[in-house]
């Protein structure tokens, strides 16, 4: 299993050559099961919404692009329990991340799965926590 950041996945979906991962990363991700936080679908949907608002997509392109998501094997991490809210906020502050991004790093760390992201701050936090990163 691989923890896949929504921004990396959305960059691939939207074919953003300057922001998307290399094909080699997608060969690895597509051959494995993605393990993602429960907020991941919302982030992917928001990236599609943002692409329409910035005129990179038309609204009628959303459904066919979103359909591509069903081709992937996706499992979801457990919801952050309420008693972890404070700890999550503190970890996010400690690592300079949003709580949403910190959840990706935590999920990868706690399950000992690699984290696929191109986000610099997430990569730095993951590195400090000895989380394997893709792309390497």
Image (cartoon, rainbow, N blue to C red):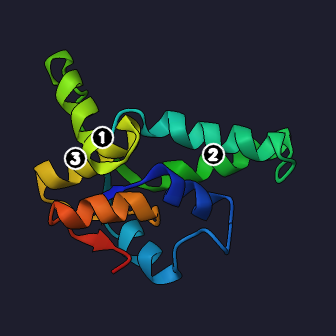
Nearer-N-terminus badge (1/2): 2
Comparing labels 3 and 1, the label whose residue is closer to the camera: 1
Quadrant in which the N terminus is drawn: bottom left
Q: Which residue in the structure is indicated by mark 3?
A: 107
From this view, report whether residue 104 is shown above or below residue 84: below
| Element type where label 2 sits in the image | helix
Q: Is 16 on the left-hand or right-hand side of 20?
A: right
Quadrant in which the C terminus is drawn: bottom left
Q: Residues within 10 Å of mark 2 (few under 14, many from 20)?
A: some
Please state which of residues 100 and 76 is positioned toward the viewer in this rendering. Answer: 100
**Which percent across, then down, holds residue 89?**
28, 30
Q: Which residue in the structure is indicated by mark 1?
A: 92
Q: Residues within 10 Å of mark 3 (few under 14, many from 20)?
A: many
**Which percent across, then down, holds residue 88?**
23, 32
The tag on residue 66 is 2
Residue 15 appears in the rendering: yes
């Amino acid at each position: 299993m691989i923890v896949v950041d929504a921004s990396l996945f959305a960059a691939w979906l939207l074919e953003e050559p300057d922001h998307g991962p290399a094909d080699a990363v997608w060969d690895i991700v597509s051959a494995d099961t993605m393990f993602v936080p429960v907020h991941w679908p919302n982030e992917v949907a928001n990236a599609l919404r943002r692409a329409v608002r910035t005129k990179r997509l038309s609204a009628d392109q959303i459904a066919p692009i979103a359909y591509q998501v069903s081709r992937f094997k996706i499992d979801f991490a457990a919801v952050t329990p309420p008693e972890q809210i404070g700890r999550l906020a503190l970890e996010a502050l400690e690592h300079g991340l949003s709580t949403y991004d910190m959840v990706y790093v935590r999920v990868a760390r706690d399950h000992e799965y690699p984290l696929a992201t191109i986000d610099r701050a997430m990569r730095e936090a993951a590195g400090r926590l000895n989380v394997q990163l893709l792309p390497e």
